Structures are given as C-alpha cells and as structure tokens.
Image (cartoon, rainbow, N blue to C red):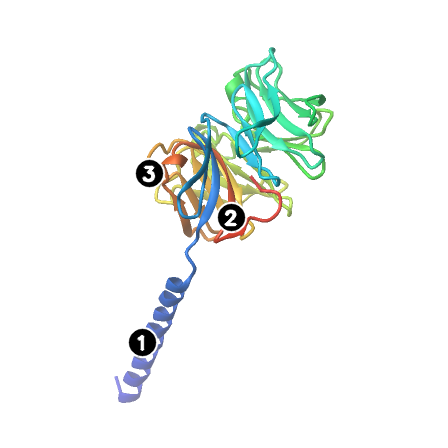
Amino acid sequence: MNRSNILLTCLLTLQCCVQHAAEIAAADDAPTMRHSYIVFGNRTAIISEEGEVEWEHRGRSRDGFVLPNGNVLIAWSDVVQEVTRDKQVVFEWKLSAENREIGTAQRLYNGNTLVTELGPQPRLLEIAPDGQLKLTVPLQPETDNAHMQTRMARQLRSGNYLVPHLLAFSIKEYRPDGSIVRTLPTDLSELGGRPAENWPFTAIRLDNGNTVASLTHGNKVVELDPEGRVVWQADNSHVNNQFRDPCGSQRLANGNTVVGSHGATTGVSMIEITRDHRIVWTSDHPAAAAVHHFQILTTNGQPEPGMPLR
C-alpha cells in the first residue's frame, strides 16, 4: 500500500472514530426520562417522578383515570368510584346483580362514565353523574367465561366503542346500538396464531386510525392499521424478555409506548419503548408490581397532554 492510500485509510478511520464518539456523547447528553404515574393493580397509587408514593387508595383495582379535576376514577371488580384526593366518594356505580364482574371505567367527553360489566349479560353501560343509567350496549365476547370476556373498553371520539375480547382473539368496534363496525383479529399467523395466546387486553385507537393493542399471554404489543395489518410490533426479543403478561399500555405524546406487565410481581414491571425499540424508561417500583393498568401523568415535569391514549 502506497503512502497516499495509508494516509486516506487513517483519515477515514479517524472520521469514523470521531463520529462514533459524537454519537456516544449525544446519547450521554440526552435527558433522562422521568415520569409520574398512577398504577391500578395490587396497589392503587400515584408515584412521583422522584419515585415517592404521593397518594394511595385500596388495592386490587383494575382500571381508572386521574381526572382533569384531580379526582381519581377507579374500577374494582364490584364497584366504580370517583374519589377525591382525601378519599371522599363523589360518584359510584355498583355491579349489577345479574352480572359477575366490572372490568373497566372511563370518564367520557359528555361527563358520563363508561363501565364494562362481565357475566351472563356482558355489556357497556353509560352512567350519568347523578347515577342514572343512560345507555346499555350489549357485547359479543364469544365466551361465557365472564373473567375472560373483555377488558379495557374505551369510547372513541366518533361515539363508537373499542372493545378487546380476549378469548375471541379480536378487537371489536361497536356502535351505540350494539352493532359491530369492524373486527380486528389478533390470532394472525404472523403473530403465531392461536397457540401464541395473543389475547387482546388494551386497545388504543390512534389519530391516524391505527390501533395499538397489548396481547397479554402473547407477550407482545402490536399496532394494527385499519385493515388489521401489523405495522409495528414489540415483543420479548426487543426488551430482554421483560414482557410478562403485558396488560396495560399507553401511547405517549412523544410517540413512545409504555407497557405494563401484570405478571411481573418483582423487578421491572413497566417499560417505555421507542418506535425503533430502544428502552428509554423502566419502573421496578414496588407499588407498580403486578400492574394491571396505569396512566402516565407527567414526563420530565410536564403534564402528558390531551386525553390519555390507554
């Protein structure tokens, strides 16, 4: 090799080293991700960005929201309550006698509360602030197993309802009259089919029309387009096998997805992952162990904007 070629090789090597060092420095300079959040599960607690438990109520909760007024809406298996921070009950709906469980609760744009009841009469209920039943939407979960009929049902901006049905391996969009607009299957062959037990637990409709879903026993989270095609997926190959029965999930304003593992009774139970599968935040907080669902409240001191996508 002549002298000019040797010099060129040295210059190229130096350029690569400088670029790599710059990338490392940029990564080191990136702000540390911090969140405050509420968890629903074995414990019902708000955890600060510093890791302190700021507020706690009775556990074994299933779903809920921190509301804009600061109160907390909580679903347990037999009752839904809105409570103030000093734990005064200002709204309540008890499980109907003909059913067996309550699954989820959501405060709607019109001020009503959406409740999912499971059992012989699986249904969505809209309840007014004064406790009056305003609407009943019958569901088609394709199973009599009450506990496995459905989970995180949500009303969409259109007024329809997005409902994940675990043992039906499908996410169904219902009109208020109970008719089905569309069904998104989760037993796709590319996801492992039914043997993979991709039971949908959380279903989130994005502004672009796609749907994000946590697939519990399948240990994965997917994003489906309106035709049901997989356009993004995160599984245990991306998170060092830290997904353990992922139930709750939330798409953040920054585009990242936070996933909670109900089966994680110790260690990391919550993971934030980017579109390109980088892990940028985790929680191993004892209060978040076996998390059923959650809501990210702030990111680095700033409130998470808009209606939570969870």
> What is the crowding at mark 3: few (fewer than 14 residues within 10 Å), some, or many (at least 20)?
some
As helix, strand or loop, the secondary structure at mark 3 comes to: loop
Could you say which is closer to the camera, residue 61 or residue 277? Answer: 61
Could you say which is closer to the camera, residue 98 or residue 177? Answer: 98
Residue on which disc 3 sits: 267
The amino acid type of the residue labelled 3 equals Gly
Considering only vertical position in the picture, is 230 above or below 199?
below
Which residue shows up at 70% across the image and 21% down it? 133
Residue on which disc 2 sits: 298
Say which mark, if any, is on residue 13: 1
The amino acid type of the residue labelled 1 equals Thr
Which residue shows up at 35% across the image and 32% down it? 265
The amino acid type of the residue labelled 2 equals Thr
Which residue shows up at 58% across the image and 42% down it? 308
The answer, for residue 272, to whether it is visible in the render is yes
Residue 82 x, y percent position in the rendering: 59, 29
Residue 300 x, y percent position in the rendering: 48, 53
Say which label, 2 or 3, has the lower sequence index.
3
